[in-house]
Amino acid sequence: MTEAAHSAPTLVERPVSIARRHGQACFFCGAVHKPMRSAGSVQLRGSDRVWPIVTCGCREGK
Ligand SMILES: [Zn+2]
């Protein structure tokens, strides 16, 4: 993934829980009791709102 891709929001087709959208839970697995780090941003289809998201590392973990 390039730096440019990192800054562009990922288009999400499905509804996403409020906690995940608000960066209170890992966007990918929903964990809430782990250290979180920024994981870029997402944009929900049909909305122009961009949400910064966080991850516990479950998607990057290597
Ligand atoms: Zn996770």
Image (cartoon, rainbow, N blue to C red):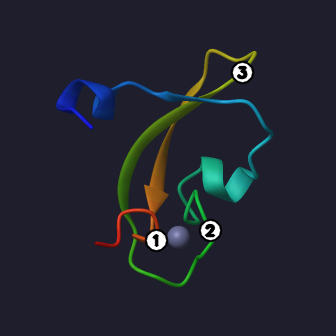
Identify the residue at image location x=54%, y=84%: 33
Q: Is the residue 4 above or below the residue 17 in the image?
A: above
Residue at 59% of width from left, 66% of height from top? 25
Which type of secondary structure does the marked residue at label 2 adopt?
loop
Pointer 2: what residue?
29
Identify whether 17 is placed above or below 58: above
In this view, the mark in front (3 or 1): 1
Q: Estimate the spatial distance between the alpha carbons at disc 3 and disc 2, rounded to whole Å.
A: 20 Å
Which image quarter: residue 13?
top right
Q: Name the residue under label 1.
A: 58
> CB atoms at circles 2 and 1 under 8 Å apart?
yes
- Which quadrant of the figure contains the C terminus? bottom left
Report how far apart the C-alphas of labels 3 and 1 lie in the structure. Answer: 24 Å
Please report whichever mark, 3 or 2, sits nearer to the chain's N-terminal start. Answer: 2
Give me the disc on residue 45. Answer: 3
**Quadrant in which the N terminus appears:** top left
Residue type at mark 3: give it: Arg
Residue 19 against residue 47 in the figure, above or below: below
Secondary element under disc 1, as helix, strand or loop, is loop
Left or right placement of residue 46 versus residue 22 in this view:
right
Q: Residue furthest left?
A: 3
Query: Mark 2 vs ligand 1: CB under 8 Å?
Result: yes
Position of residue 24 measured from the top left corner of the image (x, y, whole percent): 57, 63
Percent position of residue 51, x then y: 54, 36
Looking at the image, tell me whether mark 3 or mark 1 is earlier in sequence order. Answer: 3
Towards the viewer: 13 or 41: 13
Find residue 3 and report its horizontal and vertical position in percent.
Answer: 19, 32
Q: Mark 1 Cα within 10 Å, few/some/many (few <14, many 20+)?
A: few
Residue most toward the right? 15
The quarter of the displayed image where residue 43 is located:
top right
Task: Classify mark 3: residues with Cα within 10 Å, few (<14), some (14-19) or many (20+).
Answer: few
